[in-house]
Image (tube, helix red, strand yellow):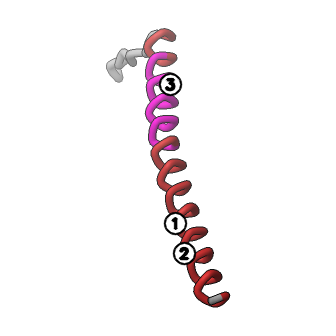
Amino acid sequence: MIAATRQSVMPAWKAWAAFLLTIAVLALAGCNTTAGFGHDVKNTGQYIENKANDAKD
């Protein structure tokens, strides 16, 4: 006879807590990524503006 193994089931509140923690971590990482992207776009715009001003002169 095969011995039955008991599978542990995660309580619903722990699953929700893990889900919310994952979402929070991803949101924070996304904010940092978005801020970095904003700086890159700003720097690129400044570079283009400087080149345009140089071409005018």
Is residue 3 shown left or right of residue 13?
Answer: left
Q: Amino acid at mark 2?
A: Tyr
Q: Secondary structure at mark 2?
A: helix
Q: Pointer 1: what residue?
A: 43
**Local crowd at mark 3 within 10 Å, few (<14), some, or many (≥20)?**
few
Label total for image: 3
Q: Secondary structure at mark 1?
A: helix
Q: x, y (%) of residue 10?
A: 43, 15
Residues at discs 1 and 3 in contact (Cβ within 8 Å): no
Quarter occupied by residue 41: bottom right
What's the magenta region? 17-30
Is residue 40 shown left or right of residue 5?
Answer: right
Determine whether 33 is above or below 14 in the image: below
Residue occupying image coordinates x 46% and y 17%? 17
Q: Amino acid at mark 3?
A: Phe
Q: x, y (%) of residue 24?
A: 48, 28
Q: Pointer 2: what residue?
A: 47
Q: Nearer the viewer, mark 3 or mark 2?
A: 2
Q: Main secondary structure of the magenta part?
A: helix
Residues at discs 2 and 1 in contact (Cβ within 8 Å): yes
Q: Amino acid at mark 1?
A: Asn
Does 28 lie within the magenta span?
A: yes
Is residue 32 shown left or right of residue 57?
Answer: left
Residue occupying image coordinates x 51% and y 41%? 31
